[in-house]
Amino acid sequence: MRVAAIRRYAWSCGLLLVPATLWNVALAGRLPPAFAPAESWREIPAPLSAAENGLRVAAFALPFFMPLDLSTPTAKRALLLYAVGTVLYFASWLALILSPGSSWSTSAVGFTAPAYTPFFWFFAIALLGRRLFWGAFYRWWMYLALAVAFLGAHVSHTAIVYARAH
């Protein structure tokens, strides 16, 4: 019974968060100095910091409680959106890492791109996570609202860092 339960919960929408999480862990140290934790979190207002971190935990935990079902046409489109969003997210990091002094990387749009491009894969996860493993009342847009709230805080934080650095 335990193996079946583990298998059931392992095949969740949370799997879709693994590539970005591994990317972040592997490459965060290669981002420009403004993204270093000590610099990035310096003088961020406490309410924004608390909101961002709390919403991050919720946005990254909830998908592990949503079954991943790829059998519908909507799911196939959502998976394509996820793939495109993940590529855009990775590209936003690569631009900052490989060409930190470029006009893109020093612009507000380029500098904050790693903060707003996750919208695409969060939207895809919302579309894929149509229900929870248990019978609680849940609609896909609830996760999207949570993710958008997190991204709002995250982009705000990154905009503050950008304003300080430029």
Image (spheres, rainbow, N blue to C red):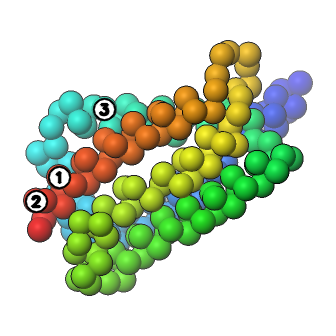
Q: Residues within 10 Å of mark 2 (few under 14, many from 20)?
A: few
Q: Position of residue 156 (x, y in %)?
A: 25, 47
**From mark 3 to mark 2, how far is it between C-alphas?**
21 Å
User: Which of the 4 quarters of the picture holds residue 33?
Assistant: bottom left
Q: Position of residue 79 (x, y in %)?
A: 70, 56
Q: Position of residue 2 (x, y in %)?
A: 83, 27
User: Which of the 4 quarters of the picture holds residue 151?
Assistant: top left
* Amino acid carrying mark 3 in the image: Ala
Q: Is residue 165 left or right of residue 120?
A: left
Q: Is residue 64 visible?
A: no
Which sits earlier in the primary sequence, circle 3 or circle 2? Answer: 3
Q: Which residue in the protein does label 3 denote?
A: 51
* Amino acid carrying mark 2 in the image: Arg
Q: Which residue in the protein does label 2 denote?
A: 164
Q: Which residue in the protein does label 1 denote?
A: 160
Q: Are marks 2 and 1 in contact (CB under 8 Å)?
A: yes
